[in-house]
Amino acid sequence: MIPIDTKTLEKYLLQSLNMGLGSLIQGETSYTNSFDCRVLENGFLFIPRLPAGYIIDDDLYQKIFLIANASLYPRYTLLKQNSAFFIPLATEDIHTQRALYFPWKTGISERIVISDLDKFTSRQKNEAIPIMKNLTINYNKVTSIAIAGNSGSGKSYALTYFLSILKNISELIIVDPKFDTPSRWAKFNNISVIHPTKNRSKSDFVSAINEQLSRALNTIQERQEMLYEDPDSIFPHLTIVIDEVLALSEGVNKNIKDSFFSLLSQIALLGRATKVHLLLVSQRFDHNTIPTSVREQLNVLIQIGNINKKTTQFLFPDLDPKGIVIPAGKGTGLIQIIDNEHPYQVLPLLCPTYYTEKGIL
């Protein structure tokens, strides 16, 4: 793509905003010195000249986002904000001492295509999990991961990718209530899995899961004691993978369900320093699926499939996805990584496409 200089980009943005804002700012334009734009390295500024004949609020911010995000695609992807993002400007002119800031990332989300998953995962180093081109997660900075999506959205495909990466960097405890894709993957890779069996009630099955969670909690406590004696102690990763969490919390004895929720909460709250992680998959993550305390500890949030305000309300309660450009197809959606390394805003997601041995999926 041919680079575009800053002045040309600023002129283009001003033209787009002058034409798009229309009646929202009552006909005021950059031609009447009502506002200006300034392009920075990691975003652009909308600089209103006050007093103004229009209200500078969330509605104006989101309208500018819609116009600019479409205008800048595919050179830049604007990072969606939950509310107006004001920053002060270094000037003594009271009329232009503030601006609305619109951060962006260069380019658009691009899918990784992997011809041989086993070879690809064996080459990964430094406990890194590639998600897209130019987007990689450092597993040392991951607390817990959630993958949500409607049936047929590609959750199992995405989960298999994560399992294939994690088997080389973490011990795995896999729970598969549907006795489906994770179980076949675990069998192929000689990893034990907890799944339903004949002549076993659901409450008995969840009790067995609680025993494993209790052992993981004991591991956390033992590691905490070691950290107390030696803060530089290094531990191997332990990841508890639970597919279709919602299937475990419905139709189970209340005491067993309460124990399940309590153990999940303690692991989510205490596991970070001791490298014990949760990887949870579900169609939705409401209060019936996991406790609120667990959801608050999730720092890699993935929503796959149909994206709208209803489907994102649990993982991204403050987000209005309107205006975010999400490519069509399976394995697409939204991702948010909260680790002080990546933009904390929600990004369009294209899960990796990979090829592997037949019979795993």
Image (tube, helix red, strand yellow):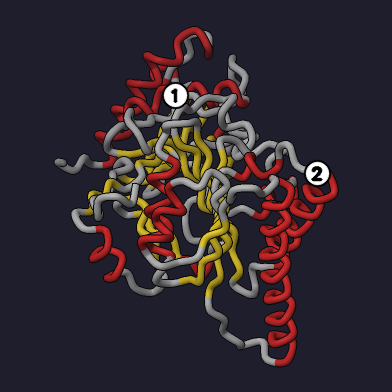
Residue sitting at the far left: 2
**Residue 360 in picture, x, y percent from top left:** 33, 52
**Which quadrant of the view contains residue 248?**
top right
Residue under pointer 1: 66
**Which quadrant of the view contains residue 328?**
top left
Q: CA distance from mark 2 to mark 1?
A: 48 Å
Element type at marker 2? loop
User: For this rendering, which residue is in front, 90 or 162?
Assistant: 162
Marks 2 and 1, the one that precedes in the sequence: 1
The answer to whether any part of residue 90 appears in the image is: no
Residue sitting at the far front: 199
Residue 359 vertical placement versus 128 (above, below): above
**Residue 122 in picture, x, y percent from top left:** 29, 70
Q: Which mark is residue 351?
A: none
Mark 1 crowd level (few <14, some 14–19, many ≥20, 10 Å Cα): some
Q: Residue at x 49, y 24 (%)?
A: 322
Q: Residue at x 42, y 48 (%)?
A: 181
Residue 43 vertical placement versus 297 (above, below): above
Give the amino acid type for the residue marked by disc 1 in the picture.
Answer: Leu
Residue under pointer 2: 253
Mark 2 crowd level (few <14, some 14–19, many ≥20, 10 Å Cα): some
Q: Residue at x 27, y 63 (%)?
A: 118
Q: Residue at x 19, y 54 (%)?
A: 115
Residue sitting at the far right: 255
**Residue 150 in picture, x, y percent from top left:** 50, 31
Q: Is residue 7 left or right of residue 196?
A: left
